[in-house]
Image: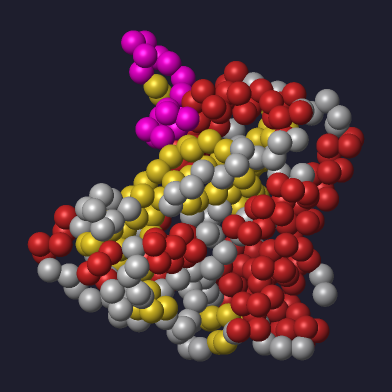
Amino acid sequence: MNLNQLRFARAVAECGSFSRAAERCHITQPSLSTAVAQLEHELGGRLFERTTRRVDLTPFGAHLLPLIHGLLGGEAELRQAARDWLQPARRLIRIGFSPAVNLRPIQLALAAYHRDHADTEIVLKECLHEDLRHRLAAGTIDLALVVRLDGKPRDAVILQEEPLVLLPRQPRDETQRGGVSLRSLAGETFVFTRGCGLADSVRDLFRRARVGIREYPGQALSYRVVEEWADLGLGAGVLPRSKVSEGNRAGLPLRLMDGRPAMLRTYASWTRGTDEHAPQREFLAWLRGRTSAIAQGLAAEPAGEGALVPRPRRAVAVRA
């Protein structure tokens, strides 16, 4: 087993295609397919079900995929730790985030921060929701961006919130374009993704409203698959507005029992030891003062009469 085999398997899982995965990895498709087959042989089971139209993870593959992500993330952290040791004066802030987070307004703010702190490098890591908590505790990230419907985590600030959108599995009446109540969805079947924290939040939303729902037995690996399955009628989906594909007109605002829109919040969370280090302490102080600008999707630097304008990005994104 080697890291390239793991990278290729992860790419196939994310692309849903051997040919697209080969393009992403800059390798021929036969070479990638051979490497994945060798990995499957060594692990003792098939990771993927291959059909003429698509490639899906087997239950065995879905079970191992988080571990593959973890191993590849560990390699990136090893390289990072080596650089930190060899360059002790280097200032670094490591931010892990859930796939459900809308990064665009946050990245604008990070670019504004970097303008005044050019000696500080900001590294972004996409992580599974549960993994974020472990990474914070282990000190491999300084800040975690997590999603919740309500209930502020300890040592956290709210950065933004956005509406949740229902993707119905059957066309809805045009009168419902203004929104769909939780109550009207009693007994509906839903498609969920795993690992990003969104599914748990949506389940909790219906549980607190005492509205019973069903879950489709399969599990989507991406938000795009949620949209596809809703369109195919396998089950309804619930996504943050920013995660709905541009051009998808099927989405409807999801409303609470009292008629208010259901909102998903993004929190920046840290451990108490994080602000003991100078770069992290400075960044947290800056972040607390910019939450309102981030919530409005603005970069946080004044121009003219108090206007806020975006700045060029300066962040390195790493999947973990």
Most foreground residue, 172 or 133: 133
Which residue is painted at 36% across and 75% down in the image?
213
Quadrant occupied by the N terminus: bottom right
Q: In which quarter of the image is residue 70?
A: bottom right
Asked if residue 295 lies in the magenta stretch, the reply is yes
Depicted 290 relative to depicted 183: above or below: above
Residue 106 in percent (x, y) is at 49, 37
Task: State the residue lying farthest toward the top.
Answer: 305
Residue 245 in percent (x, y) is at 35, 58
Asked whether residue 23 appears in the rendered view, the answer is: no
Which portion, as a residue range, is magenta?
Answer: 291-307
Task: State the residue lying farthest toward the right.
Answer: 86
Q: For the image shown, how many numbered marks are present on the structure?
A: 0
Most foreground residue, 255 or 75: 255
Asked whether residue 286 appears in the rendered view, the answer is: yes
Depicted 11 relative to depicted 58: above or below: above
* Drawn side of residue 204 relative to residue 136, left or right: left
Which residue is painted at 51% across and 23% down in the image?
289
* Drawn side of residue 39 relative to residue 290, left or right: right
Q: Which colour scheme is used?
A: secondary structure
Depicted 193 relative to depicted 150: above or below: below
Task: State the residue lying farthest toward the left.
Answer: 175
Asked if residue 48 lies in the magenta stretch, the reply is no
Which residue is painted at 77% across and 44% down in the image?
139
Residue 56 in percent (x, y) is at 54, 81
Residue 52 in percent (x, y) is at 48, 88
Quadrant occupied by the C terminus: bottom right
Which residue is painted at 77% across and 88% down in the image?
44
